[in-house]
Image: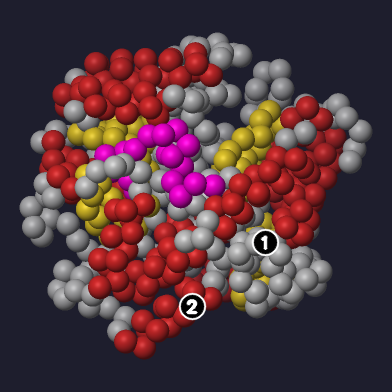
Amino acid sequence: MTDVLTAAGAPASTLPQSRHLATAIPGPRSQALHQERQAHVTGGFGVVLPVFVDRADGGILQDVDGNRLIDFASGIAVTSIGASHPRVRERVAAQLEKFTHTCFMVTEYESFTQVARWLNEHTPGDFEKRTALFSTGAEAVENAVKIARAATGRSKVLVFDEAYHGRSLLTMAMTAKENPYRLGFGPFPAEVVRAASANPLRPGAGHHDVGAHASAADVTAAALASTEATLAEHGADNFAAMVIEPIQGEGGFVVPAPGFLAGLRKIADRYGIILVIDEIQAGMGRTGTLFASEHEGVAGDITLTAKALAGGLPLSAVTGRAELMNAVHAGGLGGTYAGNPLACEAALAVFEAFEDGTLLANARAIEAAAREVLEPLVTETEAVAEFRGRGAMLALEFADRGTLAPRADLAKEVSARCHAQGVLTLTCGTYGNVIRLLPPLVIGQDLLADGLQVLRQTILDVTAEHGAPNAAARA
Ligand SMILES: *Cc1c(COP(=O)(O)O)cnc(C)c1O
């Protein structure tokens, strides 16, 4: 047990970096606060774990009952550099002393420009860029569509199976999964068309029949053929943009088969369609490179960032080719809070934290540690179909080995038991049968190892109890 993070490059922590259970989870204070919440807050918000957080730092969430939970969620890939990184605290506190808001459309401040400059210099694509800042990821997606339409004079938008792009009306239309994201909220904006994704485990789900055990090259070829067919059907010349996540987030941490993104790049070029890469969840260092599209050597015409961009403060960005970004008439883009100065200072702190490369190395080290502990489960149990992901964006898919029938029941049970033991995991996926890991990049080695062991043993226990026979002896 140590008071200091052991991960290289991580600042000394203000919270003990060890798991600690003082009460049952959730504890009595959290339960009381949750009751009060239910009296005042809309029931439309779900909650993964009804625990009220008092402090958070490094890889630890400390709740109001004094429990310390291991954070494998990072507030959904937001607090990659920790939830109270000293640089973020210092920069935001200094800005608070000066002013909180002017509205960048009314009077200007320099940090907005500096954030734009960093993104222009660091996002993939060796061309002149401009950046627009907003507050949420959905806003960034919506504005990318506005910009692509203004620049091309076309209206349609191509999206993909298992996509998640947000909860506003347009981005709900772009998101694939009905329940909970779209259910009851239609009708949706028109002109959004969906093609198959290149999901290596479940190739062609819903769109084309590749057959089980298809090679990665077959999966890529079939998914690209689906894109071509969809474009032909709807008229390729009618498409302003195609929008793709380099690794799909809410849809199940699906890493597309190799060559799919590069193939989309070629198709987009052939038909004059703007390629928008939604790096909102996978970007900003999460996968061991600054941007996940770098793994495939592909640059979008427009790259979207949000989530981890500003260390927990609300900030999103649309970064793209200068001629596209400047195709919009003056005054056509904006928003009252777009690029709020506190959030811009936080983003500048995040950029500083990434400067020496340690955090990217940490992401890769997290992958190596998790792979060692979790990947054997694929052969040791009958119900873990795949371990996948990149860097600190990792997932286990639960499904019966032979049929691939999804086992959401197992994912839910494993997650619930991890929560009870003080390890915060999230689920995701079209079938809700995926457990995803999004630890902060500053999590210490000991803490990471503890959390991974809890998860591993819980999976062995739950799969054994549920009649999914384990091939290997229990750990
Ligand atoms: C979270 C997310 C969004 C939406 O971001 P919000 O800030 O919740 O609006 C869009 N795209 C992807 C890939 C995301 O993960």
Q: Is disc 1 surrounded by few (<14), some (14 to 19) or many (20+) residues within 10 Å?
A: many
Q: Which of the 4 image quarters holds residue 271?
A: top left
299 left or right, relative to 438: left
Q: Which residue is mark 2?
A: 89
250 left or right, relative to 424: left
Residue at 34% x, 38% y is 299
| In the image, farthest residue toward the right | 473
Whether residue 82 is in magenta: the answer is: no
Residue at 67% x, 18% y is 403
Name the quarter where the N terminus is drawn.
bottom right
Q: Which residue is mark 1?
A: 7
Nearest the viewer among 180 and 312 is 312
Point out which mark residue 212 bears. Answer: none
Amino acid marked by disc 2: Arg
| Label 1 element class | loop
434 lies above or below 55 = above
Range drawn in magenta: 288-304
Distance in Å between CA atoms under marks 2 and 1: 20 Å
Name the quarter where the C terminus is drawn.
top right
422 left or right, relative to 278: right
